[in-house]
Amino acid sequence: MATPARRPAIVAVDDEPAVLAAVSRDLRRRFGEDYRILRAASGAEALETLTELRTRGDQVALLIADQRMPGMAGTEYLVEARKIVPDAKRVLLTAYADTEAAIAAINEVALDYYLLKPWDPPEEQLYPVLEDLLETWSAGAAIEAGGVRVVGHRFSKDSHELRDFLARNRVPARFMDVEREGEARELLTVAGVGSDRLPVALLEDGSVLERPTVLELAERLGIAGAPAADHYDLVIVGGGPAGLAAAVYGASEGLRTVLVEREATGGQAGQSSRIENYLGFPAGLSGSDLARRATDQARRLGAELLTIRDAAALRVEGSGRIVELSGGGELSASCVLVASGVSYRQLETPGFPDLTGAGIYYGAAMTEARSCADQHVVVIGGANSAGQAAVYFSSYARRVTMLVRRTLEDSMSHYLIEQIAALPNVDVRTGTTAVSASGDGRLAGLRIRGPQGEEDLEVDACFVFIGAAPRTDWLRDVVARDERGFILAGLDAKAAGWQLPRDPYLLETTVPGVFVAGDVRARSIKRVASAVGEGSMSVSLVHQYLVDG
Ligand SMILES: Cc1cc2nc3c(=O)[nH]c(=O)nc-3n(C[C@H](O)[C@H](O)[C@H](O)COP(=O)(O)OP(=O)(O)OC[C@H]3O[C@@H](n4cnc5c(N)ncnc54)[C@H](O)[C@@H]3O)c2cc1C
């Protein structure tokens, strides 16, 4: 935590002096040691306070506002406040009669929670909710506050890969742009590193890694571990929602469980800026938050996690199932769960392959959001993932243009279409595609083709969401797949070369004891909840297999 004068702020706003005094008192009692509790009697006054805090570079962790205020309602204030401090958590205080308004505001304000007045006793009604929100906020703030420093060029592919890896693995790290920050150049001089050796990672123990690969950095940070056991009951390949759910249930039910993840836990869901349809989170939750919680939960229950390791092949040796890892080494198990999901398809359009990582990104690349301030961002795609990204970047960028091949109604959920329509800085171009990308070492422009013909756009960053495909080539000739590479299970596996007299279990592949869950399964429903459901269900099938064969 920072020195007392720089403690992050919690800002409470209410026009009723008694309520404001009560909420400030309760906040101070529980959070006063770590946070400054600031109060304002109106939305306008609070916005001034936020602007001042922002100008001074102070952090704001949480905003609490009453809904019923004359002049500016709580939701109106939170919409404006979000533009000044987009990362602060937002809580609305409502009377029971205003519950409908609060629920409606969840999307408009990207509200994190609404609390009913009165909140007595605060130990039950107030503190648990706020503690949870502050913990989530501080996990994000810690990530930006320090730890590893990466010095590089903002639009270099190698720098982007390191930043993305650190952020997705939730390693506290700060990126320093050698072109824009004098401090970055000074650090390089002190470390004796030439500008041709970038990016450079400066670790907390003083070591300097010049142009490290992601694996080298992971090994130095102790993230890429070695397996602890010679044999496991269950090896899980893939640390998305399906794999994490299986790890949680497997470990909690006493199976010796290890999960192998090539990049960072969370999978596609970890890249989602806001998952709104996951049961039990009415205000939505960010993918990185879900990933952090699930990863902690799996570890706490005893699952072993090996990240930055790729499953490269699978072989059957009697009752053993052997997963070979890229870079050497293998894991022996009684059962394997393939939960390797899908990954983004890449655009082959001229200019795109060369500028990938240098202004063009696949997925939301949350690490880039901050550097999009005042910039023109293009989002390509018309499904929910593209819609979420457009909403997310609209809080940071000056302008967001969506390029949608057909119409939004074809492929996007209604609630997202409504959110996008309400955002003044998001422009949706339907019937439009990118024809080429241009730029000298970093993206500068896109040529697009739409109903009015071709046009050139000046663009600072482009995020592409054009569907996804499974990467299951490592299972070729071992496990049956459909023509698109999705893995067959259950009755589909039975029809595709199943050998035993018994039927395959519901999520079992053509290889007995090898199961599949989540997006990589043929006929799966591509949702977080279904991946979690299948991941947890697979564990009971593993038990059945271990007992009955
Ligand atoms: C931007 C975005 C927003 C989304 N929003 C929503 C939403 O709001 N609601 C919703 O329900 N769904 C949403 N989805 C879909 C949802 O995220 C997926 O359905 C879900 O993540 C699938 O989970 P999974 O575990 O099957 O696979 P994934 O999430 O794809 O995870 C698979 C993991 O396996 C790893 N892996 C792959 N191959 C290997 C290998 N050989 N060795 C080791 N590891 C490997 C990958 O690195 C990855 O981490 C969204 C998806 C995206 C991309």
Image (tube, helix red, strand yellow):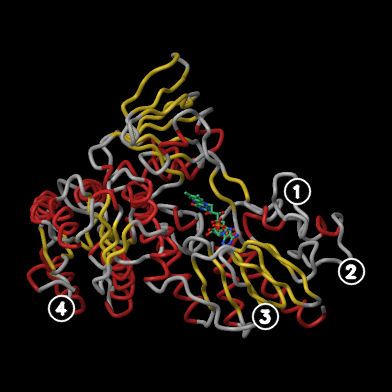
Q: Earlier in the sequence, mark 2 or mark 3?
A: 3
- Left or right position of 107 against 191: right
Judging by the rendered image, the residue that carries numbered circle 3 is 233
Query: Rounded to the nearest whole Å, what is the CA distance between mark 2 and mark 4?
Result: 64 Å
Judging by the rendered image, the residue that carries numbered circle 2 is 500
Residue in the foreground of this view, choosing between 98 and 442: 442
- Tell me the residue at 75%/44% (across/down): 483
Other-residue count near label 4 (Cα within 10 Å), few / some / many at <14 / 14–19 / ≥20: few
Other-residue count near label 2 (Cα within 10 Å), few / some / many at <14 / 14–19 / ≥20: few
Q: Amino acid at mark 2?
A: Leu
Query: Rounded to the nearest whole Å, what is the CA distance between mark 1 and mark 3?
Result: 28 Å
Judging by the rendered image, the residue that carries numbered circle 1 is 482
Residue 228: name its quadrant: bottom right
Q: Earlier in the sequence, mark 1 or mark 4?
A: 4
Judging by the rendered image, the residue that carries numbered circle 4 is 33
Q: Position of residue 435 (x, y in %)?
A: 47, 24
Other-residue count near label 3 (Cα within 10 Å), few / some / many at <14 / 14–19 / ≥20: many
- Tell me the residue at 76%/59% (across/down): 479
Pointer 4 and pointer 3: residues touching (CB < 8 Å)? no
Q: Point out the image quarter for the N terminus.
A: bottom left
Name the front one of labels 2 and 4. Answer: 2
- Left or right position of 423 against 243: left
Q: Earlier in the sequence, mark 2 or mark 4?
A: 4
